[in-house]
Image (cartoon, grey):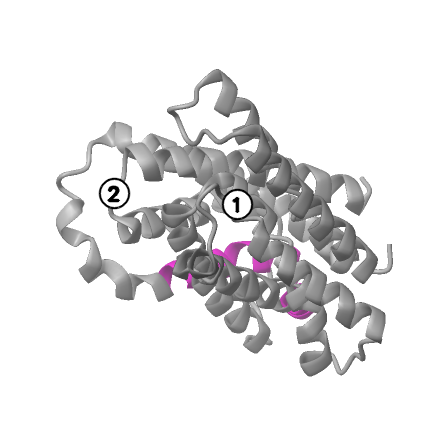
Amino acid sequence: MSYIIYAWLASLTFGLSVVIAKIVAKHSIKNMWYFNFIYALFSFLYVIPFALRYELVFPVIWHNLILSSIFDALALVFYTLTLYNLDVSIIGPLFNLRSAFAAILGVFILRETLSLTQIGLILVIFIAGFFVSFTNSFSIKKFLSKSIIFGIIMAFFSALRVIFINKSIEDVGLWETNLLNPLFSVILLLVTIPFFYKDIKKTKKIQVVGIAVSAILVTIGTIFSNFAYEVNVSISSNIVSLPFSMIIVFILSFIWPKLLEKHSLKIYMIRFTCAFIMIFSALKLSGV
């Protein structure tokens, strides 16, 4: 199967996952640290049966795998912070910031160079990324809000994660990376237990179901995306970043407005326009 098809499948499953995760965050699990850890734990548990179908080899080279796990854990923390503070129609487009960060990081990590056109495209992506949070009460203060900063940091660590996932796949193999990366991420997130251990006994099983569904979609999406990244990082990353979650939540705003969010058509038009600008700029940045 083509890496482009894997990237599209990953984009769709990630979009569904974001929507379900937001429903859980808004209506079920109020402690973001508890949500974050359960999410990471399920993401690891689900990948085990997939990975064990293959003949795994014990890694010899560890540094890129460990770095990818650190950035994976940090990206998840800031993803959860973003999820608890922003609309889904804002979160989706922010993933396109990964392309801008990937280009910038390529200069420092991969010794690549950027043309003036590429620098201009990066600036356009960042500017559109801020305006995607437009509301009727839009102001400079909200333009630089803490919630948007969380989203930017999430995109930064996600870009680092993708770079080192690709390096880890080259070092230790695809399924070794698929299995060990989420395992190490869970181990790193054990330090957050003091922030949620009191909520464990209070939580009903039904509250965890949504996280379980969202996590299995992320697991499937991650497997699809890693297949894509194995062949091509830049184009795959752009496709994976497409805001399917934004489209889903826009439709839901008419069918079930109280479920997640409800805004005027004007706001959604502005957000979709900014998202399109980000996607177009990200594709051009990747040379597509």
Residue closest to the eye, 110 or 6:
110
> Where's the N terminus, which quadrant?
top right
Above or below: residue 267 compared with residue 68:
above
- Where disc 1 sits, the SS reads helix
Evaluate if marks 2 and 1 touch, with contact meaning CB atoms under 8 Å apart.
Answer: no
Question: x, y (%) of residue 52?
Answer: 54, 47
Kindly tell me whether residue 128 is visible in this rendering: yes
Q: Residue 10 magenta-drawn?
A: no
Marks 2 and 1, how far apart in space?
Answer: 20 Å
Question: x, y (%) of residue 279?
Answer: 72, 49
Q: Which amino acid does label 2 sit on?
A: Lys
Question: x, y (%) of residue 24?
Answer: 35, 35
Kindly tell me whether residue 53 is visible in this rendering: no
Above or below: residue 106 compared with residue 264:
below
Q: What residue type is labelled 1?
A: Ile
**Disc 2 designates what residue?**
30
**Disc 1 designates what residue?**
90
To which quarter of the image does residue 205 belong?
A: top left
Tell me the magenta residue range. 167-187
